[in-house]
Amino acid sequence: MIAVLVLLQLLLAHILTDFVFQPTKWVLHKRKYKATSKYLYIHSFIAGLLTYILLQQWHLWYVALFIALTHFFIDYWKLMHNKDNLQVFLLDQLFHIIIILLVWVYLSNEYDQVLPMVVSFVSSPSALAIIIGYLLVIFPVGFIVGKSTEGWHNELLEEGKSVSLEAAGRYIGIFERILVLTFILTNNFSAIGFLIAAKSILRFSDKSEAGARKQTEYVLIGTLMSFAITIITGLLIRHIFF
């Protein structure tokens, strides 16, 4: 229980530092001036200070110092990238989380149990089945649905009726399948009905336009195919491993 508390304290300090106590003004100033920005140093100091305060273990000042220094260098790495896109942001947060986990393992004195836990996890058939299930519905299933409906998609493009954000359909499908698989594995089958109902509210074209029915049918076929494969995958995992 104490170990969980320490992890939550470290995560709270990070969230407060990066998302609550960092105004947009600071972010813009750091992007412009990078290592010469005073806010980069203030931001890193706050990361260490909040860690120190929330941990409430006053002899662990060196842990707060470590958090502050690593926060500084990770943020500096991020600022060196001219692009401030989602990929850079996720990598930045991943590095911060890794540091937090390392500090947590050190403070909880359970570093000798990390490797056995990892070995136990990758040796668990149910855990591996869940990982494989999510990877299947995210990647191969999307490819299968895309290839299966490619002819209809090309037909809509030729008629000029496929007007949507670039790759939007692919990402919508990925999140749909993740949700459906999660609902099945957690025995929340009724939630799938709400998901289908929510999607049915969307309108992809003006019904007065010619070809609107074709586009509706194309979306419906892709959705049902995506849902069917994901549901079958989830049921197989539940039947075999649960």
Image (cartoon, helix red, strand yellow):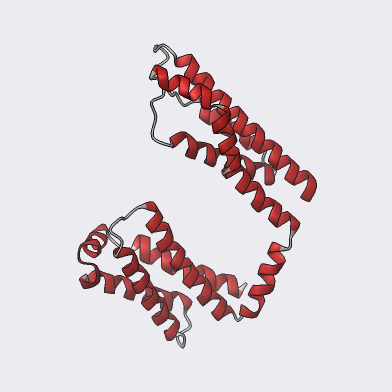
Residue 240 visible? The answer is yes
- Closer to us: 124 or 150: 150
Q: Which residue: 47% across, 34% down?
A: 169
Q: Which residue: 69% across, 73% down?
A: 116
Residue 12 visible? The answer is no
Q: Quadrant of residue 194?
A: top right
Q: Which residue: 61% across, 39% down?
A: 180
Q: Quadrant of residue 209?
A: top left
Q: Quadrant of residue 177?
A: top right
- Closer to us: 188 or 239: 239
> What count of labels does the image hold?
0
Furthest residue toward right:
240
Q: Is residue 128 left or right of residue 179?
A: right
Q: Position of residue 215 (x, y in %)?
A: 47, 20
Q: Which residue: 42% across, 61% down?
A: 91
Quadrant placement of the N terminus:
bottom right
Q: Position of residue 106 (x, y in %)?
A: 55, 80
Furthest residue toward bottom:
59
Q: Position of residue 60 (x, y in %)?
A: 46, 85
Asked if residue 82 is positioned above or below residue 101 in the image, the reply reads above
Q: Is residue 78 left or right of residue 169?
A: left
